[in-house]
Image: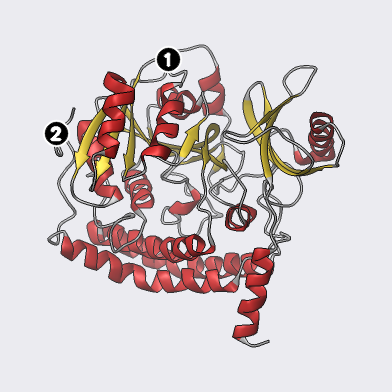
Amino acid sequence: MSRTARTQEEIRRFLAIGAVQVAELDLSGEEAVLRPGPGSPPVTHGEVFLLVRRDGLPVGTLLGRVPEGADPTKVLAALARQTQRQGDGSGGGHGHGGGHEDDTVEAAVRSAGPPPPFTSVVVATRERAGQLARALDSLLAQDHPRFEVVVVDNAPVTDETRDLVHRKYGERVRYVREPVPGLATAHNTGLAHALGEVIAFTDDDVVADVRWLTELTAPFTADPGLGCATGLILPARLRTPAQVLLESHGGFAKGFTPTTYDPREPPREEPLFPFTAGRFGSGANMAFRTGVLRAVGGFDPATGAGTPARGGDDLYGFVRVLAQGHRLHYTPRALVWHHHRETWADLETQAFGYGAGLTAYLTAVLVDRPALLPAFLARLPRGLSHARGLSAVRETGDAGNTGIGPAAPGGHDARSAHPWPRRLSRLQRRGMLYGPLGYLRARRAAGGTTGRPPSGGRTAGGAR
């Protein structure tokens, strides 16, 4: 089949992907409780992406179908219980980790003890006031005992974001303007203004679960050597073919197994550790011990969305913290619902950006920490072989299920009814080739430096 014919077939398959409902099911009591996902209508017949909870905690996902005329709660509860009895486990299957599975920190978090640390939540945004309001509403509803919210308005062209924050949120949210574009720069500005012992970052296109911040930050109290924590990201909506396709092949989720990454005990399953930072989490759901992040210089402003590098700022932060000897903990209990992009063009942009961000952040790490180069080169041959294997799995669809239930979306099973388009794989590889050049362009545009050290109360455009 010619490339043109393959492309046409991929487009046909893409357009045939139907919408999937999003819901959550709590099995804590005798009677299961079914709720629609954030912003979704009540569940009816058809396919449903389901988050399963016990005692309010996320334990896994599955994809189910509700027959027309059937009771959605009864159908989905029976499916969830059957899946667990078949041995996938109430822990939600297998983790995407590569570190060691760690229930110790999770148990310490749940036990009665000191409250989670005072935390600064930073949300960087640019001209998306409607989405930002939805995110802020969920953040201000958190059950965390003591936190602040800082909105960084990045290179704004209107006063819409500032007006929203002042009009609707008043003193509950601090507003900071950062005129220099770039997500890493905006995050560094937030870091400079943060008052908390821990600093958490999320995006303006999420809805945070009510326990998100508590679950994300409590591990810092349980483990004094912890430098970073990341959490679970699930889709808020699966209404378009692009959203369903992305989630069918993993989305942003990292599984339901709590995992600790310790640089003193490198995982044998990760030949490029700690350079395989995409395994650790994503920027929409991450937190750092504030002093640790400041000590490593924050994020490299020549990385991230809004720069020629296209991404990689979060991955850079993960590796820099691990390289300083601090541990990183992934917890599926810290949940945010993410609004995936909606169109094929968005997927193309994301695919290229993911590839570019990957190699851009690796370039940034090696430029900023040349001492890591020998370790990287020593790991490179096995790492490339490992990466080729993963790419082949994604394209051929031969991989194991890593969720609670059957095929994706939800199970994050590459054996999906929706094959990953080769065009998107090609774009990601092109992005990987472009990434180092993009980083060097961004660095040159920034004057050849890695940016200001985010260690004090610099006012970027004035905190209000």
- In the picture, the quarter occupied by the N terminus is bottom right
The percent coordinates of residue 276 (x first, y second) are: 45, 56
- In the picture, the quarter occupied by the C terminus is top left
**As rendered, which of 326 and 434 lies closer to the eye?**
434
The percent coordinates of residue 93 (x first, y second) are: 69, 42
On screen, residue 291 above or below 10: above
The percent coordinates of residue 223 (x first, y second) are: 42, 27
Mark 2 vs mark 1, foreground winner is 2
Determine whether, in the image, residue 321 is placed left or right of residue 110: left
Residue at point 17%, 63% (across, down): 445
Question: What amino acid type should be assigned to the residue bearing mark 2?
Answer: Gly
**As rendered, which of 413 and 113 lies closer to the eye?**
413
Q: Label 2, on which residue?
A: 462
Q: Label 1, on which residue?
A: 115
Residue at point 64%, 65% (across, down): 14
The image's colouring method is secondary structure
Specify few, some or many for label 2: CA neighbours under 10 Å numbering under 14, 14-19, or 20 or more: few
On screen, residue 316 above or below 120: below
> Which callout, 2 or 1, points at the residue further toward the start of the chain?
1
